[in-house]
Image (tube, rainbow, N blue to C red):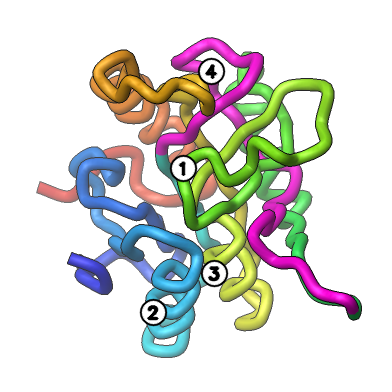
Amino acid sequence: MAGASRTFPAVLLLVAATDRELCGHDGLVCGVGPVEAAATTARALALQPVVAVLHIGLAGGRGLEPGTIVVGTEAVYCDLSAEWPVIDRVTPDPVLAETLRAALPSARALPVHTSAAVGGACHTASGGPLVEAMEGFGVLRAATLAGVPAVEVRVVSNEISEQDRTRWQLAAALAALERILPVLVAALGGPAAPPG
């Protein structure tokens, strides 16, 4: 349920689109899609003291193996197009991003493209690897406006262009996320494991 949250220390707010992506940790379920994510995150940040936001979840990828861990170098909103300048990119807090890269040296450092539709980032003019998720820009933008440092970490579960969802490796990607989450939370000063 979007907006459902459990208590979490006022040090770090863990944010994920779904309860499954929280992997048993306390945090905020922001809902699916950039609008829901932005609104829910903004509300949570207005209601409780937060020192940092760690946004986590699964993602599609192009040119990346399922199970690849990605620390976002920026959140790019791909659905927005206008004839005048718009805000369509948010960079994570550099200290948080560097801390997580050091904690997970095998993680890739790449932009994460946000789209409200699966495959919406496919038109992105990028010859290299591409990461696509549905909430990152909304979460990071809400945190930026609230003056709270934030960072996004994703685990690739599928090739973006794969139409057959039975071929997506959701269970394996969730297992990988569950394995790295205590490392991420501990690196950012939160509890290493969920409270009993």
Please give the label number shown on residue 44.
2
Point out the image quarter for the N terminus: bottom left
Question: Which of the two labelled residues, at mark 1 and mark 4, occupies the earlier sequence position?
Answer: 4
Marks 3 and 4 in Cβ contact (< 8 Å): no
Q: Is residue 148 above or below residue 168?
A: below
Identify residue type, mark 2: Ala
Residue 179 in which image quadrant: top left
Residue named by callout 1:
118
| 115 falls in the magenta region | no
Q: Nearer the viewer, mark 3 or mark 2?
A: 2
Q: Secondary structure at mark 3?
A: loop
Relative depth, front residue between 67 and 192? 67
Q: Position of residue 79 (x, y in %)?
A: 64, 60
Question: Which of the two labelled residues, at mark 2 and mark 4, occupies the earlier sequence position?
Answer: 2
Q: Is residue 76 above or below residue 37?
A: above
Q: Which residue is at 76% across, 67% downward?
A: 81
Q: Which residue is at 50% across, 30% downward?
A: 60
Q: Secondary structure at mark 2?
A: helix
Residue named by callout 3:
51
Question: Which of the two labelled residues, at mark 1 and mark 2, occupies the earlier sequence position?
Answer: 2
Q: Local crowd at mark 3 within 10 Å, few (<14), some, or many (≥20)?
A: some
Q: Is residue 193 above or below residue 141?
A: above
Relative depth, front residue between 10 and 4? 4
Question: Which of the two labelled residues, at mark 3 and mark 4, occupies the earlier sequence position?
Answer: 3
Relative depth, front residue between 60 and 82? 82
Please give the label number shown on residue 68.
4
Q: Position of residue 41 (x, y in %)?
A: 44, 73
Q: Which residue is at 72% across, 30% downward?
A: 109
Q: Local crowd at mark 2 within 10 Å, few (<14), some, or many (≥20)?
A: many
